[in-house]
């Protein structure tokens, strides 16, 4: 779809494509709209009727805005009908994943048996996760070429 050159993350790209297809299917099934007649009220109505939480609705609105932005730059539309649609407010104070305290990290790392071939990489991966707060997927994609020693002891 058109988002391939705009979004580098394959997961985000797939989410946006699903959101856009959902909106276009809703337009054709519920309103039999000519896409050029879509107004901000239609986008808002789609948002109001969507199931799911606020993050899902925000993702869909962002995808729809990006879709119409692309159509504006390609001179299909003069104005983006989704640009003025207000998304729902949500504030995430704390993430769903519990953090690990310094004390827990100090207990965990020495408890890993490094006398085995499996223990050394396990300790390295867990140490990277603890000290960098990187995502598991990012650490899983690491290769030896990714690591650089800064010279410190």
Image (cartoon, grey):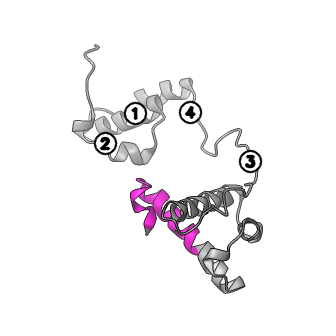
Q: Residues within 10 Å of mark 2 (few under 14, many from 20)?
A: few
**Percent coordinates x, y for residue 65 in the rendering:** 60, 59
Tag nearer the camera, 2 or 3: 3
Residue, disc 2: 142
Residue, disc 4: 100
Residue at image location 31% in from the left, 42% down from the top? 142
**Percent coordinates x, y for residue 101 in the rendering:** 57, 28
Residue interval drawn in magenta: 2-21
Give the secondary structure at mark 1. helix
Q: Residues within 10 Å of mark 1 (few under 14, many from 20)?
A: some
Q: Nearer the viewer, residue 4 or 95?
A: 4
Q: Gap in Å between the C-alphas at discs 2 and 4?
A: 22 Å
Q: Residues within 10 Å of mark 4 (few under 14, many from 20)?
A: few
- Give whichever of discs 1 and 2 has the lower sequence position: 1
Tag nearer the camera, 2 or 4: 2
Tag nearer the camera, 1 or 4: 1
- Give whichever of discs 1 and 3 has the lower sequence position: 3
**Percent coordinates x, y for residue 20 in the rendering:** 56, 69
Q: Gap in Å between the C-alphas at discs 1 and 2?
A: 11 Å
Tag nearer the camera, 4 or 3: 3
| Disc 1 to disc 2: CB gap under 8 Å | yes
Residue at image location 77% in from the left, 70% down from the top? 45
Q: Which mark is residue 83?
A: none
- Give whichever of discs 4 and 3 has the lower sequence position: 3
Examine the structure image and report whether residue 9 is included in the region drawn in magenta. Answer: yes
């Amino acid at each position: 779809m058109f988002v391939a050159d705009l979004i580098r993350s394959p997961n985000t790209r797939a989410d946006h494509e699903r959101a856009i297809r959902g909106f276009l299917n809703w337009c054709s099934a519920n309103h039999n709209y000519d896409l050029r007649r879509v107004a901000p009220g239609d986008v808002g109505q789609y948002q109001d009727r969507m199931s799911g939480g606020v993050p899902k609705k925000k993702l869909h609105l962002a995808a729809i805005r990006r879709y119409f932005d692309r159509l504006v730059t390609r001179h299909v539309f003069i104005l983006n009908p989704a640009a003025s649609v207000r998304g729902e407010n949500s504030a995430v104070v704390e993430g769903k994943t519990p953090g690990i305290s310094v004390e827990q990290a100090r207990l965990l790392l020495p408890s890993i048996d490094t006398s085995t071939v499996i223990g050394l990489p396990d300790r390295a991966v867990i140490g990277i996760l603890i000290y960098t707060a990187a995502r598991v997927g990012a650490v899983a994609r690491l290769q030896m070429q990714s690591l650089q020693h800064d010279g410190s002891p």
